[in-house]
Amino acid sequence: MSAPVVILGIESSCDDTSASVIIDGVQYSNVISNQTVHEEFGGVVPELASRAHQQNIVPTVQAAMKQAGVTPEELTAIGYTRGPGLLGSLLVGSSFAKGFALSLDIPLIEVNHMQAHILAHFIQDKGEQNPVPKFPFLCLTVSGGHTQIVQVNGHFEMKLLGQTLDDAAGEAFDKVAKIMGLGYPGGPLVDKLAQQGNSEAFEFPKSKMQGLNFSFSGLKTSVLYFLQKEIAKNPNFVEENKEDICASVQKTIVETLLSKVKRAVRETGIKTIAVAGGVSANSGLRNELKALGDKNKWNVFVPKFEYTTDNGAMIAIAAYLKNLKGDFSKIGMAPKARLSVEDDLGWKS
Ligand code: KG4
Ligand code: ZN
């Protein structure tokens, strides 16, 4: 029997420090250290994120290795996020990964964070046989920084069919939450309140973007104007209606996203649909996508919660798949703040 392939994956692109061990494609640990330091600012402060990564990275990696019962000498390779993301945050993960790989004399594997969100669908959990999407499939990738529809033709063959031209869907959730004074990150808070509200209570305009592109900046403005008008009449309007406001905003975002998914299915004829990224944790989006899939006989893939927001396991699985191809990183590479989901290459730069 050949030796097991043991991959350590490190994620540090934004405000979560995460490390995971994947052995032969199966997840043995996925430790995520959230940074609470940003809450009082209502958004991620890049300098503070870099510092928190620096503080968290060693204990996070140690915890992931311990949980998996793996020693450094047993590692086959180390995968890390090369981009896209905040440069200072990326530098912490990439420098740590380089140093660790050099000290162990094992390969280093760079991972595109946007591809990794999608490849999270290929993670196997211990004792389970998770079905994986067959190529080609469509993936709606919705996070705090991106909103994209991607045609996935192979693990590393991805074609961007459409994307947001301004705010991302996660940003729309976060900004509405901020206007309402709910806290940060707003997506999970809006989701929770929405579950107790009436989504038909208020109507917000949906942007009409051409083709498969999105726009969410208008929604934030219309919610702001609407609330200003209502608060002028009743200062307690938000407090008294927060569940209905959240449910109505969530419905608008979910319907906008799904209308483009329907269009992508029509245009490509592909009926295997996956969703990925932090906003794929949203209960409304998950339920509506599953319902739409049942109705239209699509094969729908919704990730487990722990693989929706940023996590090390998605980096580890992407690195595992690259390791199978012998696709390693040069030790001299630098992180990239900007990187397209189609980019499987920067590896040459
Ligand atoms: O993928 P992710 O962890 O980080 C990025 O790569 O951006 O996504 C974070 C985003 C945030 O905007 C957060 O508010 C949103 O995902 N999010 C949600 C939910 N959970 C996280 N949005 C809506 N509903 C949720 N349950
Ligand atoms: Zn992400």
Image: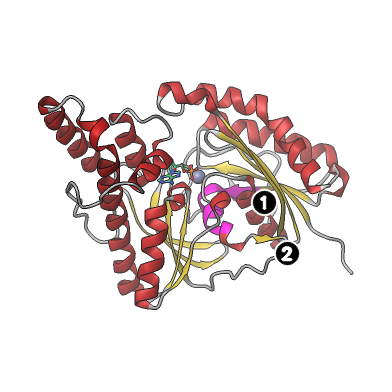
Where residue 228 appears, x then y in whole percent?
16, 29
List x then y, in percent, for residue 50: 57, 26
Q: How busy is the neighbourhood of tag 2: few (under 14 within 10 Å), some, or many (20 plus)?
A: few
Q: Identify the amino acid type marked 2.
A: Gly
- Residue 220's spot in the image, x, y percent? 24, 38
What number is the disc on residue 316? 1
Image: 232 above or below 138? above
Distance from label 2 to label 1 (Cα)?
19 Å
Residue at 44% in and 21% down? 40
Quadrant of the drawing holding the N terminus: bottom right
First along the sequence among labels 2 and 1? 2
- The boundaries of the magenta stretch are 110-120
Q: Main secondary structure of the magenta part?
A: helix
- Secondary structure found at label 1: helix
- Hey, what amino acid is under mark 1? Ala
Where disc 2 sits, the SS reads loop
